Image: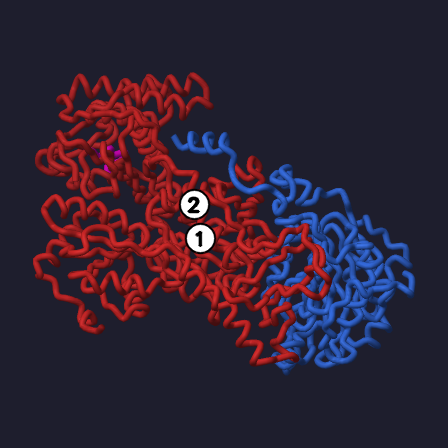
Chain colours: A red, B blue
Amino acid sequence: MSSSNSKSVIVWVGGAAGDGIASVAETLAKACAREGLYTYAYNSYQSVIRGGHVYMQINISEKKVWDQGDLTNFLIALNLDTVKRHGKEVLPGGGVIYNKEKIKVEPSDLGTGVADYGIPSSTIAAKFGKSPVMQNTIALGALAFLMNFPMDAVAEVLTSTFKKKGDEVVNANVGAAKAGYDYAKENFKPSTYSWTLSKTHRMFMTGNQAIAFGALAAGCKFYTAYPMTPASGVLHWLAPRGHKYGIVVKQCEDEIAAMNMAVGGGHTGARSMTATSGGGFSLMTEAVGLAAMLEAPVVVANVQRGGPSTGLPTKQEQGDLFQVLGASQGDFPKIIIAPFTVEDAFYSTVECFNLADIYQCPVILLSDLQLSEHYETVDDLDFSKVKIDRGELIPTTATAEPGTYKRYKDTPTGISPRAIPGTPGHMYVAASDEHDEDGVVISDVFTDPVKRIVMMNKRMRKMDTALKALPKPQLIGPKDADITFVTWGSTYNVVRDTIQTLEKDGAKVSHLNIKYIWPFQAKEVGEILRSCKKTFIVEGNYTGQMERLVRQETGYSIHHHLRKYDGEPFGPEMVIKEAKLILKGSVKVSELAGVR
Amino acid sequence: MAETLDITKFKSKIAPDWCPGCGDFGVLTSLQKACTTLGLDPKDVVVVSGIGCSSNFPGFFGSYGLHTLHGRSVAVAQGVKFANPDLNVIMTGGDGDGYGIGIGHFIHAMRRNINVTYIVMNNQVYGLTTGQTSPTTELGIQTKSTPEGCIEVPINPIQLALVSGATFIARGFSGAQDLLAETMVKAIKHKGFSLIDIFSPCVTYNKKNTYPWFRERVYSLQEEKHDTSNFDVAMKKAEEWDTRIPIGVFYETTDQATYEDLEPAYKFGTPVKQKLGLGKDEITALVNSFK
């Protein structure tokens, strides 16, 4: 949490959809990132293009920020609704910045110690053209003064953003921001903030962009998608780059096509990927099983949002874990990875492509709205970690005596050397029906229980092989911690934030994040958890899906949980509060925790 | 077409398990003849099917093959083609697979004019599931699921293809194999989406649309000097049914660009043949684009 004189600040920008909130927030966050500050920006939005209520929460600090924070120091309100909704969530010492010629703010709208930073923005904006979003730029300038942030840095970002639109637009925007800055300087009390600006230029990106960048770096050559929030960011980043890097980017008629096409592309030898959210993934599931049966490498990202059904299209949830675990009929090998930070989303995507090629099976990247859509400053990525491993792929120059190649050869690892169409002498049929080692269908006339078992075991053996090779889960923090957090996906971040606070208060805390969800590393996870004193899982769903998976796979019941399914992300305050109660011993241990 | 054509190259070691007399046998032989006539190398041919009697086709054909999900052959096949446009991609399936559950993919593939060939063995009934009504079952026909007779108007695949943007549209009859093989040669050679809807009688479940029923009615469009460049005439011809039924090529155009012509990513070459990974300069530029 931020307060005046500290080295961090939280800013919220709120208004109706279409008011230009994202551009104010992005300009601010980008300017901070370029000056060397860390930022984390979460957009709380609705499924409307115009109207509704939208607010962007931006957490800014000299040190790494893990989440959007709880309450705010400054609120830029672009309409009265924003003041009414959030005026009381501004911390004492902070203030509300708004156009006083457009909206009337009553003292009762604000909490005590919260300043009224009304600006005659309409009058000022008139000097810089007719665009109604110019008052946003004025507010941004005023904010720069109030948080004692260099105006030049804001001007620089505005200049680069509007460069394409010509000098006139650049000058108007920079002029409006400066006018806002000057107005604040003349009329408001001086800022109490001070910053040490390292000027380190860091990347500023979303989780979806990291996934898309990871796909590009991994050599994805075929990307299919049907538009769906919150996964469309991957499509939007790859689409304009397809023709620059030789990636066929295909928007399909539906998710069934997207997944089946990706399976076809993967089977043919192109690194192929699709992304969607839970609803689209429901349509894809039959083809997830197809990929497993054909032993076709394919990567599918499910960026979770609030369910069930159309649910909360623009809101956060981690409710699809059981959906992806159970996707498609029958038993088959699949790998599920949940990236947990923006950086990790990049590396995990690369890893997904390698695992898909190595184990010749569908690999599911399970992200969530918060991770995929929030913007964050990211330290430089390490490209030496980006390795491309195609697994046991037979070169297309190889030859074989026709009729001798066994595509689905039973091997000790379960992995069979893979030939792609176009390779001489290796012709085979990849069948959705159960088949023999050479690909011949054994489901109907040639039904053969013995061969069926051989083939089933061969495919499933790949999971044993994968389980041995996957990086092991690690406990972060002391072995004798008083409390151990368990997370998966984006909740990793709010827990890191929480742990910093708890440690400052003297608590001994450890943390187990589960990244490799399937095959589940039951032995390691069970051993780690059984060695802990008090275990506490934080996850964003109603039924505690990871908590139940851990119990199912390890027989260990986590002691405490905090679950959230209201659509908004966890803030650190609620996690800290619960952890403190658990530490004090005033929260009842889960009844199931006695079951060992 | 020469009678002595050696089609061994395109035969597989598996004998078809279709019912004796099934129309699909004729389709299989015709495609083997067509690929042989075209001098294709089996390694460069991928036959993709869905699920159904006719979808067992790839298993009986000597090339690369894919046997996919019910209704999804067209989607998977397009994935194959997008990834490697150098391959000859031929989709095989039935009327239930293509015009029922898979109709969405069928229509969108046609409007993309992607360079693939779709062979639909249309027997106007669901065979593998033992005789229910299909999207092309005639009005009034009794099936297991329509014991009082079918009360839905059948889909006209030729007209559907015409309005959906397919650029080569033909009909065949498995009882007229030479013409069928010739039509297949034209379809595979055609640049763009080609459809051959084939009357492939189901000897077990369709007691109306039988070999003799078709033999009495079919005539060759080409023998009657049909103008294959005329869209309106093709639409009209596709309406003929009860007494005279046309087979052969209805419509053909090369005026439309193919998907392959227009996809900008192909300037880097075939996706499966590209070198993977980013160069140092590319990495620097991409990283800076986020700053």
Question: Could you tell me residue A370's position as x and y percent?
Answer: 33, 47
The chain containing the residue under callout 1 comes to A
Viewed as shown, does residue B258 lie left or right of B247? left
* Residue carrying label 2: A211
Name the one closer to the observer, A69 or B110. Answer: A69
Q: Is residue B90 visible?
A: no
Dot 1 corresponds to which residue?
A301
Q: Residue at x 28, y 51 (%)?
A: A491
Query: Which amino acid type corresponds to the residue marked 1 in the rendered image?
Result: Ala
Looking at the rendered structure, the secondary structure element under dot 1 is: strand
Q: Is residue A527 above or below residue A339?
A: below
Of residues A57 and B266, the one drawn nearer to the viewer in this rendering: B266
- Taking the view exactly as shown, the residue that stands out farthest to the front is A412
Q: Is residue A75 magenta?
A: yes
| Mark sitting on residue B5 | none
Asked if marks 2 and 1 touch (Cβ < 8 Å), the reply is yes
Residue at x-position 42% and y-position 53%:
A365
Which residues lie in the magenta part?
Answer: A74-80
